[in-house]
Image (spheres, grey):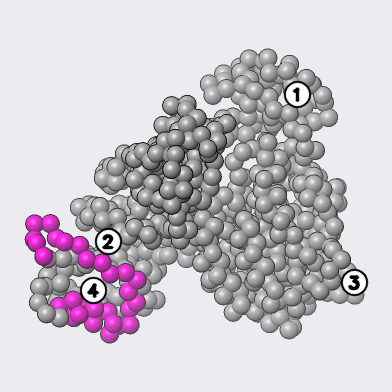
Amino acid sequence: MVIVLGHDVRLEDKNGIRAFLSEKGYQIREIVGQEETIFGAVGPAKVDPREVELLPGVKSVIPIGKPYKLASREMKKEDTQVQVGGVKIGGRRIAVIAGPCAVEGREQIMETARILRASGAVMLRGGAYKPRTSPYSFQGLGEKGLGYLKEAGEASGMPVVSEVVATDHIALMRGYVDLFQIGARNMQNFELLKQVGKTGMPVLLKRGLSATIEEWLMAAEYLMAHGTDNVILCERGIRTFETYTRNTLDLSAIPVVKKLSHLPVIVDPSHATGIREKVPPMGLAAIAAGADGLTVEVHPDPARALSDGPQSLYPGQFEKLMRDIEALSAVVGKEVAKIPSSPAFRGTAFSVSTDPPAGRGKTRVAFQGEAGAYSETALQGFFHFDVESLPRKSFDDIFSSVLEGKAEYGIVPLENSLTGSIHENYDLLLRYPDLKIVGETKLRIIHSLIGLPGAEIGGVRKVFSHPQGLAQCRRFLEEHPSMHPEPFYDTAGSVSFIAKAGRKDYGAIANREAALLYGMRVLKEGIETNPHNYTRFAVISRAEREAPEKPNKAIIIFSAPDRPGALFACMKVLSEKNLNLTKLESRPIEGKPWQYLFYMGVEVPDNAQLFAQALEELKAISEEAPRVLGMYRV
Ligand code: PEP
Ligand code: MN
């Protein structure tokens, strides 16, 4: 059962509840969520929940009807994010694990790791103990293979995962791997589950060849009941009557499990299909269905692979798959997890340093709006570690908070794909020369109509939201003439407003996260007129804090003199150096009618010297020296 504790529960009450439950034979896990703290109590005992509800400090008791408890969504409303080395799996990120079926030798795994890392994999896989159908097939290199795997992981900066097949390998393997894999054939090897669970290490749990979803979750429950909280579920295809593909990828298991459990779910399209050319489409389908990542077999020379060659991708195919996942990620509202190029910047989405500020706990990031705003969702996708998000009233407040050191970073929207640039933020970047753009992220904006629990769409009479939110849902509002749009200063703020008002005839248009946060209900999701609605955000920081490693993008600002061909001359500088422009936009200069500033996004090539030369040449021909608003890695 789940025991929800009051917000201000006293320590002595907590201890009292613990003592009561453990005396009755329960095991207790404390889970501290965003909004509440809960005790998860599991065990063979039976106690009347009403008895527990009467204990001081208890807000409510929810019995869990499912046979799996710790793994169940009832136990934890928020998605679990499993940390493996510097990589987090789950939440708003798509993590891709890749590597050969088996470690075949030092050269093979070192070379593969280098290529995979360059294409964007965040974790390296490779079997050292292979559970093969035939005793005459290659069985893996054992400990020697684990040594090569670890070395390749360290050299490429990726954590490593390998399959554990026997309880007596556990102690040895702990010294080599960051994540234990339990293979499909061992999903119900309960002794193995118990012993691996006891290590407390993260586990990648494959679904059994013919396991039901409930059996799979029960296997996760075994791991969790014995001591690990960090289980990643992996759908890898099941046995059906169809034999064309090696297995049948059960895509529907993804949304089903994500509803039943808080654990992250990834997909292995390689073992699911067994056919190389089917791997990318099924991998993409899995991401579209909501998977938190993939594990993919890649081999530098699949024709010579000692196992699973026919399903292993060529490195070039993997690179293409990663590009396609990148394009798809924004559509599903996620970021592809990345490991930045320098070890000093490990653990972040891009090039931002992870160092928490000296003497403080979490890194602070200022955003505009109230909790649950789109900007807050965007920053949670960008930072790969837990940050404290600080709501601010205005964009200017974000800049001043960062300048004054009240926040280490700020996040500001620069551009929306439907409504264009947010000029105020470009102007602020000019007004605060000590702040620089250190990264960027984009978010698909999916608006929801939100109402009180128990409210019905038909009963909503007033809809509150930021004017942009109302404008972007014009068609929906036209189709529901009984709903009157009411402009409000902030989208998430409108949700907190209707929550306080407590009126079932009030609705708000905002991010679905805001509905969860304020205990409201999503009445309809995806009501924006145009689904191609993306916002690009810049992450800003004090210039001296950051020195992004190998920047590949720059935003600069310059003014061209008012004479024929002046802008063309500036563009020519870039064109001659073969520098790609990603954006060009003009802004009037305050106090100088009909004179303009130009904002420009430029791709910085590997040879950064070319970019530096271009800046020098621009300086010679533009009115004022061009200003670099930020150089960073995307
Ligand atoms: C593997 O990942 O190498 C493997 C053997 O997978 P499964 O257990 O899913 O067959
Ligand atoms: Mn394999």
Q: Does 261 sit left or right of 522 as displayed?
A: right
Mark sitting earlier along the chain (3/1)? 1
The amino acid sitting under disc 1 is Ser
Mark number, residue 629: 2
At horizontal 78% and vertical 56% (from top left) the residue drawn is 207
Mark sitting earlier along the chain (4/2)? 4
Q: Which residue is mark 4?
A: 615
Give the Cα distance between marks 2 and 3: 61 Å
Give the Cα distance between marks 3 and 1: 48 Å
Give the Cα distance between marks 2 and 1: 58 Å
Give the Cα distance between marks 4 and 1: 68 Å
Q: Which residue is mark 1?
A: 22
Give the magenta-colored segment's residue range: 566-594
Q: Does 441 sit left or right of 88 as displayed?
A: left
As for residue 575 lying within the magenta part, the answer is yes
As for residue 282 lying within the magenta part, the answer is no
Q: Residues within 10 Å of mark 1 (few under 14, many from 20)?
A: some
At horizontal 54% and vertical 24% (from top left) the residue drawn is 7
